[in-house]
Image (tube, rainbow, N blue to C red):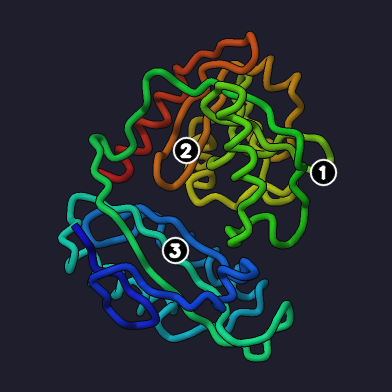
Amino acid sequence: MSSWLLYNGQWIKDEAVLPVQNRAFQYGDGLFETMRTYGTEVVSAQRHFDRLKEGMRLLKLPMVPDLEIENLTRLIAKMINKNKWFKGARLRLTVFREGAGKYTPLQNETSYVLVGEPYVVEPFYPFVGKGRIMGLYTDLLKPVSMLSPIKTLNCLQYVLAGIAAREQGVDDCFVVNINNVVIETVNANLILLKDNMAISPGPAVGALDGTMRLKVLELVHESGMEIVQRGLTTEELLNADEIMLTNAVQGIVWVKGFGERRYYFEKSKQFSARLNNLLNN
């Protein structure tokens, strides 16, 4: 069934039709946010909105009224109601530059499209029992720049890493930055657990500034574990007790294996349970 989407303030009961001259298509000139909803609200809404606002500032995209936090919250609630996605949904907000020109735009106007789909699982963040088998992607190293922490429309790094995972016969791949340290995976941030320490690569080493990573690190801190934010070597990955992967849609996913190494998941499962309890409360 078709669903309602929002394109520049217009509700459309179909796919939005964008011209081929669209800068998002031609130049990847924009960014996006992926969000989960609970009832009619976005989970960790403030963090998503803060990252969106910072990304627009970095890309020099003018803010428009609909994307101000209060208005966007209202529009998301209206989308949930129009589509009757009260039990949960996955939303994607894409913000891009309008206007003619080649690499250099002749105008600087902001457009957006908000789309979604129902996403109902129980519990809200299920702890997947089988875990992920991981590979390593090193053909294209991720730059460390002001754009590294935001979700730009240039996702070739992750697309190629995802293809590499399929070719390697694994579930996901660790992504490496230009300094040859592991910083994240195809679609998740990374938290390594060793003894009473949690090591998690953050924006300083080029990792995405993940909203779920921040929430889980708060839970880790509350548990009394020491937190270190830096890149990881493959040797550290192989010597870890547990490895957690975090993103806004899935919550926490545990790593089952990397190479010949196999991991535990006791603490990861506990953190996942606490994450769900936070939502329920």
Q: Classify the position of the C terminus by image quarter.
A: top left
CB within 8 Å, label 1 to label 2: no
- Classify mark 2: helix, strand or loop: helix
Q: Give me the disc on residue 178.
A: 1
**Picture layout, residue 204 above or below residue 116:** above
Instruction: Look at discs 1 and 2 and give the one toward the viewer.
Output: 1
Give the spatial CA distance, label 1 vs label 3: 31 Å
Residue 54 seen anywhere in this rendered image of the structure: no
Determine the residue positioned at 47% across, 18% down.
265
Q: Amino acid at mark 2?
A: Leu
Give the residue drawn at x 17%, y 66%: 81
> Helix or strand or loop: what does disc 3 sit on?
helix
Where residue 145 sits, quadrant-wise, is: bottom right
Quadrant in which the N terminus is drawn: bottom left
Please name the amino acid that badge 1 sits on: Ile
- Residue 220 x %, y %: 52, 34
Q: Is residue 8 left or right of residue 39?
A: right
Crowd tier of the residue under label 1, counting other residues whose Cα lies within 10 Å: few below 14, some 14–19, many 20 or above: some
Q: Which mark is residue 219?
A: 2
Q: Which residue is mark 3?
A: 46
Q: Residues within 10 Å of mark 2 (few under 14, many from 20)?
A: some
Q: Mark 3 is on which residue type?
A: Gln
Q: Quadrant of residue 124?
A: top left
- Label whose residue precedes the other's in the sequence (3 or 2): 3
Between 130 and 222, the one lying in front of the other is 130
